[in-house]
Amino acid sequence: MKIAHVLSLIMLLLLGLLAFIVFQRFQGDAEVGKRLAENNCGVCHDMTPNRKNGKGPYLWEIYKRPAGVVDFHFSASFRQLVEEHPFLWDDDHLDRWLLNPQAFIPKTKMAQQSKDHPVSFDGMESAGNRKDLITYLKRLQ
């Protein structure tokens, strides 16, 4: 085999590997998402089939679920938004929420810190981390 053919084959293999890595990152990493969920969400939200509300509503089967349908005492601002503009927890809405819940729904309880709610979630800046977390949430079925 000529050296040019060998180099071409190596280049094709490297390009294929690079494409695979990019594709995997685009899809999100559910294992990383699970760790992010445990560290960021698990404090207030149940992520098991038990579907128990805590400081926040349970997250089991959240993906594609209409917002606000869980029997939970949501903030007035959250209830008003979902009554006026119903939406599903899809990739876009979850991403916007995880980026900055306060910007998505002003005065939402999740982003407020108080005596009764000592932990607040201000958002997740990393687009990669949000993608990983959403990939994990999709698997809570």
Image (cartoon, rainbow, N blue to C red):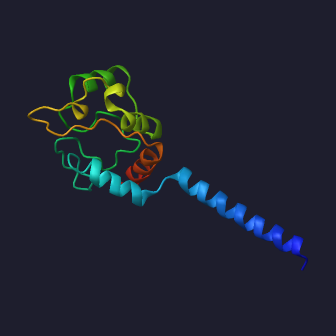
Give how far across and how far down residue 102 sits, in percent: 31, 28
Side (left or right) of 21 relative to 35: right
The residue lying at 73 percent from left, 67 percent from top is 13
Front in this rendered view, residue 31 or 125: 125
The residue lying at 8 percent from left, 34 percent from top is 115
Side (left or right) of 108 relative to 117: right
**Total labels drawn:** 0
Q: Is residue 141 among the parts visible in the rendering?
A: no
The residue lying at 21 percent from left, 30 percent from top is 112
Quarter of the picture holding the N terminus: bottom right
Front in this rendered view, residue 72 or 2: 2
Please identify the residue farthest to the bottom as the structure is shown.
1
Front in this rendered view, residue 121 or 137: 121
Q: Is residue 128 above or below residue 71?
A: below
Please identify the residue farthest to the right as the structure is shown.
2
Give how far across and how far down residue 81 sits, in percent: 32, 22
Please identify the residue farthest to the left as the structure is shown.
115
Q: Quadrant of residue 123?
A: top left
Side (left or right) of 89 relative to 113: right
Side (left or right) of 97 relative to 75: right
Q: Is residue 121 among the parts visible in the rendering?
A: yes
Quarter of the picture holding the C terminus: bottom left
The residue lying at 43 percent from left, 38 percent from top is 95
Give how far across and how far down residue 55 sits, in percent: 16, 41
Give how far across and how far down residue 124 sits, in percent: 37, 40
